[in-house]
Amino acid sequence: MRIDIISVVPKLMESFFAHSILKRGQEAGHVEVVLHDLRDYSVNKHRQVDDYAFGGGAGMVLGIEPIARCIRALQSERTYDEVIYMTPDGETFNQRIANQLSLGGNLIFLCGHYKGVDQRVRDLFITREISIGDYVLSGGELAAAVCADAIIRLLPGVLNDETSALTDSFQDNLLAPPVYTRPAEFEGSKVPEILLSGHEAKITDWRFSQAIERTRTRRPDLLEGME
Ligand code: ADE
């Protein structure tokens, strides 16, 4: 899978994608993440990419020309499943969307900035609009990084232990159960006996019931409509 991210401040995301699981996923060839500076596609010698809003009002708007040039240049090289605009008024990102996007092909993420992008970008080029929550960030970069991270870790081979993504919170609409490591006792606080028993089937049952309980108390909305 290839993920292209278009931004006016691509540097914000550089170190994020250069570390840990995301770095390994790229080095192992499971994913290629390419950051693009929108200013490289400016139609203006000052590398300007934004302008005043028609009709007045505070704040600058990212113009359609550099964005069109950048997206078209990418689409002339390969096909993309989705061209995603990160915006607080998009559909709220969740594990279901991460799963869906991880199964498909290449993705373009466009990060908004200032007052957003010219509406015609959304009308003509964008296939999906995603928000990471009901709050406003100063740009779409962190939001695109969040989505890309959630997608990349689901790609086969990216995680060391392939089954570990399967036991994540939300994967079955359940929160993950508690986990413990050594020591088995810390200042009188003990690890649940069952986890030390070596009885695999009982441990699986215990984890499942803990996941249900945790979901019931913290996120009952996730259980609605489930049998
Ligand atoms: N850009 C600014 N705020 C955002 C949000 N909450 N989600 C996605 N993109 C954004």
Image (cartoon, grey):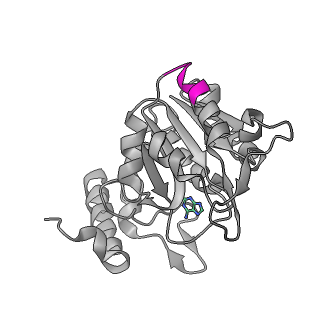
In the image, residue 162 sits, relative to residue 123, either above or below, namely: above
For image coordinates 54% across by 37% down, the residue present is: 108
Residue that sits furthest to the right in the current view:
46
Judged from the image, the quadrant occupied by ligand 1 is: bottom right
Q: Check the picture and name the quadrant holding the C terminus.
A: bottom left
Q: Is residue 74 magenta?
A: yes
x and y percentages locating residue 55 in the rendered image: 62, 65
Q: In the image, is 126 to the left or to the right of 8?
A: left
Which residue sits at x=47%, y=54%? 130
Magenta stretch, residue numbers: 72-78
* Residue located at (44% from left, 66% from top): 178
Q: Is residue 122 above or below residue 76?
A: below
Whether the magenta-drawn stretch holds residue 205 is answered as no
x then y, percent, for residue 136: 59, 69
* Circle count: 0
Left or right placement of residue 221 versus residue 11 in this view: left
Of the pair 160 and 34, the residue shown nearer to us: 34
Hey, which quadrant is residue 213 in on the image? bottom left
The residue most toward the top is 77
Seen in the image, is 77 located left or right of residue 221?
right
The residue lying toward the viewer, choosing from 11 and 226, is 11
Q: Residue furthest left?
A: 227
Q: In the rendering, at what x and y percent does residue 15 appear?
A: 75, 45
Q: Horizontal and vertical percent for residue 10?
A: 73, 44
Query: Can you say whether 77 is above or below 126 in the image?
Result: above
- Residue 105, by quadrant, is top left
Q: Nearer the viewer, residue 92 or 68?
A: 68
Q: Residue at x 33, y 69 (%)?
A: 210
In the displayed structure, does residue 69 sit left or right of residue 79? right
